[in-house]
């Protein structure tokens, strides 16, 4: 009598299966590709859009002016990017990799503050002067204009449509002060990514701790925690941001903290729900019986098994933080000393005529970024939901 075939048992971990299911869709690949492009723009912005040569030779002496003018932020972001690439190759668990990355970036920030000393004043007109023109050879960035280069020596007239300047190619035109829009778009990707990831990271950290304690202890702790969650859910984040800007001035770091501190309640609800289900599981009871400390039970044993729904919420949270910053910048209350998509969008309607290029390109970037994160969130949700997995022919 022929025996029935045994069902195939997947040797992949749960996270690996979720990641593989997530990548099955076309939309998530587009979303990840767009975010990847933004990351490259943010990391290598000084080398992609700048008024100074990347490399040049004068009288046989080779120099790299762009390296001499790198800011502390530029150097730290570059080092952090390569640390992230190196850590991703290490044979460590996800939590250990994250701790190594945090330690490495903290050390990199300290070293950058101690060693990087760019000139206090940068005069971009000088880079079009004889010292940088009469050279043996030079290699310029793809966009030969810095975001703060207002082209005074070239007689810039402020707002100009794409290709309106004879002899000077501006692929996306110029803004009200004469700076190249494409250069500012590339550098503005830093604000979009940093406020999204850092603000969401703050909210996620608070939400995991509060939600974990509510779900694990339940009872009076859960009741008090839920009242706290309800209070924070009722706080109007945008109006709180407007109030802080009015009293304390415009600061990107302040925006990150406020968005993070007021946005953790949703993550706390997700973690609480998962922990309420997991706390009665056998492996959790075994960890308690073994006398493991509370932080080990919560974050080493329970959290990895309840983190899946958080991935969906995080992707939507990043998109929401980007929209909040863009809204403030559009209202003229954003960051002053750095380019922002929202601030550029505001310039589209400031003058008596509608400046279409200031609306299409920054507005399109905001739309595409939020759309990309939403696609990623939808893909995670579809991969995590067991009903959707069975409906789509998911593996057993």
Image (cartoon, grey):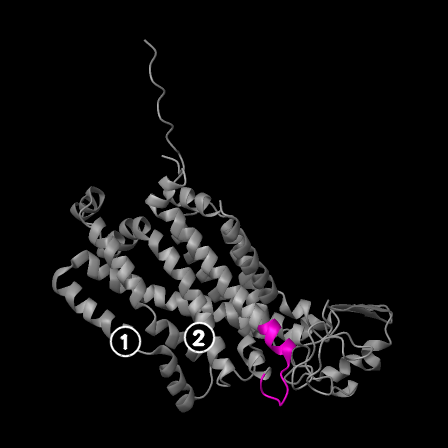
Q: Residue at x 30, y 78 (%)?
A: 235
For the view shown, which residue lies furthest in the front direction? 353
Describe residue 373's horizontal placement relative to residue 310 as left or right: right
Asked if residue 4 is positioned above or below residue 331 in the image, the reply reads above
- The span from disc 2 to disc 1 (Cα, nearest Å) is 17 Å
Q: Quadrant of the N terminus?
A: top left
Mark 2 or 1 closer to N-term?
A: 1
Characterize the local packing of mark 2: few (<14), some (14-19) or many (20 or more) Cα atoms within 10 angstroms: many
| Frontmost residue, 260 versus 1 | 1
| Frontmost residue, 126 versus 96 | 126
Residue 311 appears in the figure: yes
Q: Position of residue 355 (x, y in %)?
A: 64, 81
Characterize the local packing of mark 1: few (<14), some (14-19) or many (20 or more) Cα atoms within 10 angstroms: few
Q: Tell me where the magenta segment starts and ends, as one range.
A: 349-362
Q: Mark on residue 171? A: none
Q: Mark on residue 324? A: 2
Q: Based on the picture, tell me whether residue 372 belongs to the magenta stretch.
A: no
Q: Quadrant of residue 126?
A: bottom right
| Frontmost residue, 248 versus 291 | 248
Q: Position of residue 336 (x, y in %)?
A: 54, 84
Q: Based on the picture, tell me whether residue 361 belongs to the magenta stretch.
A: yes
Element assignment for label 2:
helix
Q: Quadrant of residue 343?
A: bottom right
Disc 2 to disc 1: CB gap under 8 Å: no
Asked if residue 3 is positioned above or below residue 179 in the image, the reply reads above
Q: Quadrant of the C terminus?
A: top left
Q: Residue at x 33, y 14 (%)?
A: 3
Element assignment for label 1:
loop
Describe residue 113's horizontal placement relative to residue 306 as left or right: right
Circle 1 is placed at which residue position? 234
């Amino acid at each position: 009598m022929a025996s029935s075939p045994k069902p195939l048992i997947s040797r992949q971990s749960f996270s690996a299966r979720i990641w593989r299911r997530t990548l099955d869709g076309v939309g998530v690949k587009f979303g990840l590709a767009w975010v990847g492009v933004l990351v490259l723009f943010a990391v290598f912005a000084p080398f992609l859009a700048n008024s100074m040569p990347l490399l040049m030779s004068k009288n046989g002496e080779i120099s790299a002016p762009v390296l001499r003018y790198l800011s502390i932020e530029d150097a730290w972001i570059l080092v952090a990017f390569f640390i992230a690439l190196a850590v991703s190759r290490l044979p460590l668990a996800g939590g250990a990799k994250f701790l190594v990355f945090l330690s490495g970036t903290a050390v990199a920030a300290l070293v950058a503050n101690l060693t990087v000393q760019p000139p206090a004043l940068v005069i971009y007109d000088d880079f079009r002067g004889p010292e940088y023109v009469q050279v043996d050879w030079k290699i310029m960035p793809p966009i030969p204009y810095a975001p703060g280069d207002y082209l005074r020596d070239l007689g810039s007239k402020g707002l100009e449509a794409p290709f309106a300047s004879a002899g000077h190619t501006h692929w996306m035109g110029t803004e009200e002060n004469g700076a190249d829009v494409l250069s500012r778009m590339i550098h503005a990707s830093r604000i979009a990514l940093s406020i999204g990831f850092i603000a969401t990271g703050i909210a996620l950290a608070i939400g995991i701790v509060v939600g974990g304690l509510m779900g694990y202890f339940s009872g009076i702790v859960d009741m008090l925690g839920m009242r706290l969650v309800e209070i924070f859910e009722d706080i109007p984040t945008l109006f709180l941001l407007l109030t802080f800007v009015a009293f304390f001035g415009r600061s990107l770091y302040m925006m990150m903290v406020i968005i993070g501190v007021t946005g953790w309640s949703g993550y706390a609800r997700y973690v609480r729900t998962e922990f309420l289900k997991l706390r009665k599981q056998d492996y959790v009871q075994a960890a308690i019986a073994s006398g493991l400390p509370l932080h080990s039970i919560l974050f080493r044993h329970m959290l990895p098994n309840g983190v899946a729904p958080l991935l969906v919420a995080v992707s939507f949270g990043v998109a929401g933080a980007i929209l909040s910053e863009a809204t403030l910048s559009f209202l003229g209350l954003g960051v002053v000393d750095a380019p922002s998509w929202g601030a550029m969008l505001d310039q589209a309607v400031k003058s008596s005529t509608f400046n279409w290029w200031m609306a299409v390109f920054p507005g399109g970037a905001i739309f595409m970024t939020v759309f990309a994160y939403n696609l990623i969130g939808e893909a995670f949700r579809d991969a995590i939901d067991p009903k959707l997995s069975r409906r789509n022919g998911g593996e057993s």
